Image (cartoon, rainbow, N blue to C red):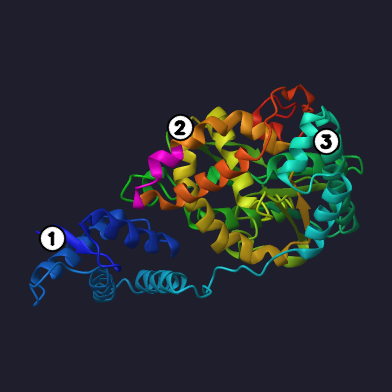
Amino acid sequence: MIEKIVKRDGTVVPFNRDKITFAVFQAAVSVGGRNREIAEKVTDNVILLMEQRESRKGYPTVEEVQDLVEKVLIERGHARTAKAYIVYRYEHALRRAGEQSLTYSADNIPYAKLWEALSWSVDHGCVNLEQISTIIRKGEFSELVRAGEEFYHAELDGAAEKILARAGELKMIIVAGPSSSGKTTTTIKVEARLKEQGYSFVPLNVDNYYFDLDQHPRDSSGDYDFETPQALDLELINHHLMLLLDGKAIQVPVYNFKTGKREKTTEELKLGERDILLIDSLHGLSAEMTGSIPEEKKFRLYIETLSQVKNGDKRFIRWADIRLLRRMVRDMQFRSYSPEQTIRHWHYVRRSELRYIIPRLREADIIINSFLPYELPVMKKRLGHFFPDFIKKFKNNPDRADAYERALRVESIFSELCQWEDEEAIPDKSLLREFIGGSAYSY
């Protein structure tokens, strides 16, 4: 029996076979595999080899275990999974060494959009958290809301103009962006502008194409990893897209998020003459999702919270932290997820964004900035009391290091910021209502 394992830093920790199974299954899912039993068998073989290894001195190391995983995968004929596992292992080695990853990109920064956001913040006196707090103390929160909404609506007008300029050839609009960037509300508002010109969106909700939950990878804590494109039935999505653009009807599946299963199909879906197919998805820019459709028939719209607000240390607030707060509120209200569950799961979200979404940013035809400068005081009111407890709970837990770091950053933001109590000043058609509730739109 293998009871202990030696980490890279020399620490001896209890051996957990589930971590091997999770890593193998995750690699398999990335190349289309769905059989968890095979991952379990690979784990059994790895453990057997560990027990039979010649050197009985000391506990096995993490590197030894990973070498054996590669060996077993190759010898059992799982070449594609082995390749995915090797790439995953190599990328983590690069990250530990502080070098740039093969697939993670930090260079896709839309500087022109950031300059617009920064210029607006300067003009409206909300460049940093202290200035936003001053606006609140002066009783000018409503004015900040009005100005923020005007900026966002100007972004929408620009997007609609670009789409209409290509309306004659377009058959599909892809709305993409990282989690909780505001894709759904933005899509509704862009469509309203196009309807004035006689065009309509026909949405295809790709969330209905998730594989059943029991086919998703789980880590040693039992958390599901459903943030990758491979969590979706990409083959069926592409088949349905081709049928729709050929003028044919399809039967769309319906995914039940409570049971974690595809349970039925909807009525027929078909495109009319002036209909534009809408793909609103976290992974909309992924080539695998719409690879069957010619490029000239697609328009890519990307959404991100491009905040240019600084904290007291003169560092810009991270966009991902803003979106984390949005998702925490939304999950708590509409998805029966506690704020703690959301922050614990967020490392999966970010890993997926960095691998599958952000590297494709430059492919977008237009970028919309969905950050609202008044949202942080509202989020402090909603979530501020959770973070001191998160910090205490995650501090000495190495498996929650990512959540701990994020909790520290958010708590630092909230410590510099006045909170806002009365949400009546926020319009019922505001993008923020998508997360805090009370929206005039149906989601």
Q: Which residue corresponds to the image point at 50% horizontal and 75% vertical from the top-left?
A: 99
Task: List x then y, in percent, for residue 312.
Answer: 67, 49
Q: Report the front residue among 409 and 77.
A: 409
Tell me the number on the disc at residue 2: 1
Q: Which residue corresponds to the image point at 29% horizontal and 73% vertical from the top-left?
A: 70
The residue that disc 3 covers is 144
The residue that disc 2 covers is 258
The quarter of the picture where the N terminus appears is bottom left
CB under 8 Å between discs 2 and 3: no
Q: Is residue 368 left or right of residue 265?
A: right
Q: Sequence-wise, which precedes: disc 2 or disc 3?
A: 3
Instruction: Identify residue type, mark 1.
Output: Ile
Task: List x then y, in percent, for residue 20.
Answer: 27, 60
Can residue 232 be seen here? The reply is no
Which segment is the magenta one? 390-398
The quarter of the picture where the C terminus appears is top right
Real-space Cα separation, disc 2 to disc 3, in angstroms: 38 Å
